[in-house]
Image: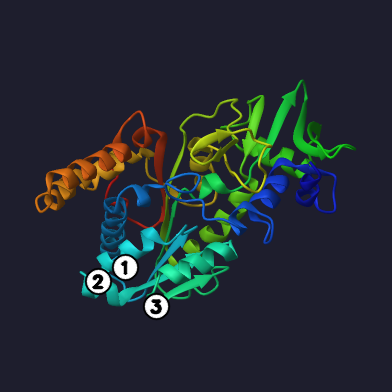
Amino acid sequence: MKSNIKFFKSSRILPVDEFFKNVLYDNKLGYYASKLPFGEKGDFITSPKISYLFSEIIAIWIISTWELFGKPKNFNIVELGPGDGSLINVLLKSFKKFPEFNSSKKIFLYEKSNYLKKIQKEKILDKNVNWINNFNTLKKGPVIFFGNEFFDALPIKQFIRKKHSILEKNYILNKNHKIEEIFNKASKTDIEILKSFKTIKKLNFIELPKFGFQELKKMIKKISELKGCILMIDYGYLKSNNQDTLQSVMKHKKNSLLDNLGKADITAHVNFELLNEFFFKNGLKVNNVITQKAFLENMGIIERAKIVAKNMKFSEQSNLYLRIKRLLSPGSMGDLFKVILAYKFNKNNFAGFK
């Protein structure tokens, strides 16, 4: 258990988000600093790894949004948390089929993990792709921020309401170097934030993506300057509830939250009702939150699969449709994953949102 000390660093007590920020993102010891979590050999699999058609659909959506914005000469695309680079490689290949768009686009990758950056740079060979640590590089033209399973990986705060008090959940390292939960009075700042959101105001158990909101505010500032939008696809729920959604996964199986720290993935479900309210509060318009199934079908993924399947052997066709089914199935990723679009623009007829 002594290995737990490294995640507490100089303090023996940390709020949930600070503790898991250390567990996930510490440059030397964190989960994203030491292993490749994606794919069959990793801990979980993402949509771009299930089927390249998912990434093709995102490429078409981005190009249609560029057209909606009036085909600007300078057009910025920022992928948030690009993983192992699978999605961006398909985007680059797809974009080459549209010369006018291809000459207008600039691609930026926003990645916190130095380890993943190194892997991305080995896989992504296009010299025009730029890695950034902030958004100051974006100077001209509209910007699209896109994230697939980006927000769920950002640490959250947890609170409980007891009578007239709000208490924050913390982790403490006891004398035996074991981790325990304790609840301390929440800070005035956090209490004010919680009270400001109608969607979570009356909950008895509250999850607040404070760190995630800080990240989004940086993007919203840039969108306010340049115009543009944020498209996020993630798993989560549409109505605020009292659920504790923190979960840990290792080798595609559930892992006890405090076991295998630094070796297992830790995420939380996204509260899309709260996210919707946050975007409105910060001056963006929001299209209806829809399921991944609805978004991909609206964008024509089934029709695209039929075209691709024509030149395939039967076994390849079966594999293709099994993968598409996984992306669309209501019992799997189809309904669990939601799509939200927040934007600053005078039109709202974005592709995929009927």
Which residue sits at x=72%, y=26%? 161
Quarter of the N terminus within the rendering: top right
Q: What is the crowding at mark 2: few (fewer than 14 residues within 10 Å), some, or many (at least 20)?
A: few
Looking at the rendered structure, the kind of residue marked 3 is Asn
Report the residue marked by disc 2: 96
Q: Earlier in the sequence, mark 2 or mark 3?
A: 2
Corner quadrant of residue 176? top right
Point 60% across, 35% down: residue: 246
The residue nearer to you, when weighing 347 against 315, is 315
Is the C-beta separation of discs 1 and 2 under 8 Å? Answer: yes
- The local secondary structure at tag 2 comes to loop
According to the picture, the residue beneath numbered tag 3 turns out to be 128
Residue 165 in the image: state x and y as whole percent: 78, 27
Residue type at mark 1: give it: Leu
Q: Earlier in the sequence, mark 1 or mark 3?
A: 1
- The three-letter amino acid code for the residue at tag 2 is Lys
Q: Is residue 255 left or right of residue 138?
A: right
Mark 1 closeness class: few <14, some 14–19, many ≥20 residues within 10 Å: some
The residue that disc 1 covers is 92
Image side of residue 264 versus residue 322, left or right: right
